[in-house]
């Protein structure tokens, strides 16, 4: 059996369903959802319910407050979740799902705007709806033409169409998206600052300390760096690289002052800088550790490149 051929046939059938999709009514659906003062509530049974849950999640994460309720649960009390300020997206390919049809009179009794997603414009669901989004497909990808496949793909895509149209209408930005996804990579890039990840404890040496003493402090600090601080400001940094170069020098002597081998006037970074900008700066300059300073240039911590990577900053 040629499964690659079958896979291609399934993808072609579903792609064709998307290409032939009818987007009539999308303008009114967008206006209803956009003007909803409360929540956009999505409901459906079976596969439609599973798709509906995803549509609700997509709407909620892109600026349209939304949640999913199951029609059966709605009949047993969850209808109380729907208020006159809400709107409803009801999904049923046949438009005749029994559990769904039972709640429609109760929804319309409160004049709640109803967006239907159905494959039958003459169905009971369509008659109750203020606008119908057509999810009819000529053929399911299922070889028996029975299991919801092409139709559920189209329904999911129609939910994405609605969400994207609403994003455009709201001028939804990357910053808006990140505010709903603070734990995601975009949220981290846009909101996490250096001060959120910096270490506040770090090894410090005086300018008079010997190289031997400095090595002991550097080892205990476990950062591979030693900072020389005077009046709360960093004058120099001794790194592992500085130490290796010192050992190769003819003037290497453990009794000499460590600051003689340190990097003077090192680069620093302000605490309110975005962590993503700090990572780029460190990568561009091939720096492993940066002192973090406040507006007055006083050291308040250090940030290591490993801290940024481990935090998922990209």
Image: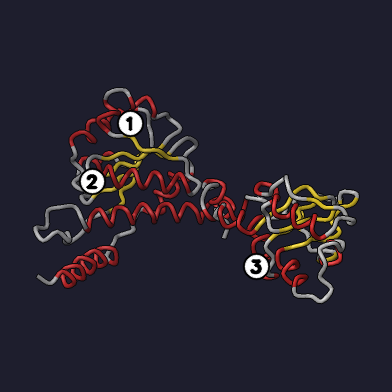
- The earlier-in-sequence mark between 2 and 3 is 2
Task: Check the image and name the residue furthest to the top.
Answer: 77
Say above or below: 246 vs 201: below
Q: Position of residue 88 (x, y in %)?
A: 36, 38
Say above or below: 289 vs 301: below
Residue 107 circle label: 1
Residue at image x 9%, y 70%? 1
Can residue 171 be seen at all in this image of the molecule?
Answer: no
Q: Nearer the viewer, mark 3 or mark 1?
A: 3
Q: Using residue 304 as the reference point, say whether residue 5 is left or right of it.
A: left
In this figure, which residue is indicated by the disc labeled 3? 283
Between 184 and 100, the one nearer to me in the picture:
184
Q: Position of residue 82 (x, y in %)?
A: 39, 30
The reply to whether dot 2 and dot 3 touch (C-beta < 8 Å) is no
- The earlier-in-sequence mark between 2 and 1 is 2
Assign a secondary structure to mark 1: helix
Quarter in which the C terminus is drawn:
bottom right
Residue at image x 22%, y 42%? 46
- The earlier-in-sequence mark between 3 and 1 is 1
In this figure, which residue is indicated by the disc labeled 2? 47
Task: Check the image and name the residue furthest to the bottom.
Answer: 250
The reply to whether dot 3 and dot 1 touch (C-beta < 8 Å) is no
């Amino acid at each position: 059996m040629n499964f690659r051929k079958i896979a291609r046939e399934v993808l072609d059938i579903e792609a064709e369903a998307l290409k032939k999709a009818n987007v009539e009514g999308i303008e009114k659906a967008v206006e209803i959802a956009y003007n909803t003062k409360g929540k956009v509530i999505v409901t459906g049974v079976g596969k439609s319910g599973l798709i509906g849950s995803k549509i609700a999640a997509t709407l909620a994460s892109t600026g349209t407050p939304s949640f999913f309720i199951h029609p059966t649960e709605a009949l047993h009390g969850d209808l109380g979740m729907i208020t006159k300020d809400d709107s409803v997206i009801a999904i049923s390919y046949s438009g005749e799902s029994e559990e769904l049809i039972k709640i429609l009179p109760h929804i319309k009794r409160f004049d709640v705007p109803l967006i239907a997603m159905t494959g039958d414009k003459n169905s009971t669901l369509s008659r109750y709806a203020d606008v119908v989004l057509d999810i009819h497909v000529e053929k399911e990808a299922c070889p028996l033409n029975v299991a919801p496949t092409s139709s559920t793909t189209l329904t999911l895509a129609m939910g994405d169409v609605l969400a994207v149209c609403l994003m455009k209408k709201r001028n939804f930005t990357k910053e808006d998206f990140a505010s709903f996804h603070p734990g995601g990579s975009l949220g981290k890039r846009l909101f996490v600052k250096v001060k959120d990840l910096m270490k506040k404890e770090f090894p410090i040496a005086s300018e008079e300390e010997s190289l031997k003493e400095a090595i002991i402090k550097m080892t205990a600090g476990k950062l591979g760096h030693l900072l020389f601080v005077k009046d709360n400001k960093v004058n120099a940094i001794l790194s592992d690289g500085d130490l290796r170069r010192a050992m190769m020098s003819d003037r290497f002597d453990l009794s000499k002052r460590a600051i003689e081998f340190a990097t003077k006037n090192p680069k620093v970074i302000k605490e309110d800088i975005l962590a993503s900008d700090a990572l780029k700066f460190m990568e561009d300059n091939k720096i492993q550790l940066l002192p973090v300073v406040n507006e007055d240039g006083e050291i308040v911590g250090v940030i290591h490149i490993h801290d940024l990577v481990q935090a998922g900053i990209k």
